[in-house]
Amino acid sequence: MWVEIGAMVIAVVGVAGTLGGALLTQRGAERAKRREIELVRGHEEIREYLTLRRTCYVALNRDARQFTTALNRHLHVMRERGVEDADRDALDEAKNAHRDRYSEAQMIAPDAVLGSATTVNHALNTVYGQVKRLERGDAEPGETMATVSRAQQEIWNLLREMRSAMREDLGVAGEA
């Protein structure tokens, strides 16, 4: 009798072990699958954020360069002939486009990039103010066509620094 009970206990423990092992294996596989899905989601989020930053940087770089070019063009117009409404509109459109891209970058770019973008933004708006004062004939002391033109040309160096910070953030700095 004890032998029969012992055999039954062994059989029950064997079946429980087999079923328990299968259950533990299934739960382990589910946990591994969940971790894998979370890892994939994490990579997708990183990729999406990188794409978002890249798109923002391309637009900010383009619009900052166009604003710089518009300031240069406006200075040439001021030297060569009187400024017309179309000239003012072109400059203001470039300024507004840059403002919009810079506002977007303020929400997306990390501090290293935003620092350079802020420097560029400040320089562009400073030169814009100087250009508008010259245009109105209300220049501040030291503001001449020559000094404003030099300040506008210096923005190109700031743009190069901003672009380098953006490329470094995107992981493309130094690549061919």
Image (cartoon, helix red, strand yellow):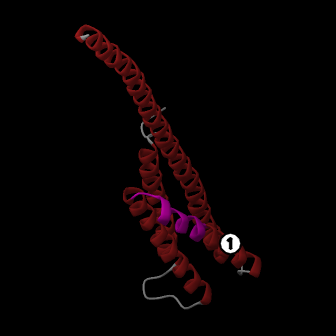
Determine the main secondary structure of the stretch shown in magenta: helix
Is residue 167 shown above or below 57? Answer: above
Is residue 28 shown above or below 113? Answer: above
Which of these two is toward me, 103 or 45? Answer: 45
Residue 84 picture quarter:
bottom right
Q: Residue at x 42, y 61 (%)?
A: 114
Which of these two is toward me, 119 or 44? Answer: 44
Q: Amino acid at mark 1?
A: Glu
Q: Residue at x 41, y 60 (%)?
A: 116
Q: Which residue is mark 1?
A: 93
Quarter containing the N terminus = top left
Residue at the far bottom in the pictured view: 138
Q: Position of residue 22 (x, y in %)?
A: 42, 22
Q: Residue at x 43, y 83 (%)?
A: 142
Residue 108 is one of the magenta-drawn residues? yes
Q: How many numbered marks appear?
A: 1
Q: Position of residue 74 (x, y in %)?
A: 64, 72
Query: Mark 1: few, some, or many residues within 10 Å (few <14, many ≥20)?
Result: some
13 with respect to 83 (left or right): left
Q: Position of residue 11 (x, y in %)?
A: 34, 13
157 with respect to 48 (left or right): left
Q: Residue at x 49, y 59 (%)?
A: 108
Magenta stretch in the rendered image = 98-110
Q: Position of residue 88 (x, y in %)?
A: 69, 78
Is residue 2 shown above or below 34? Answer: above
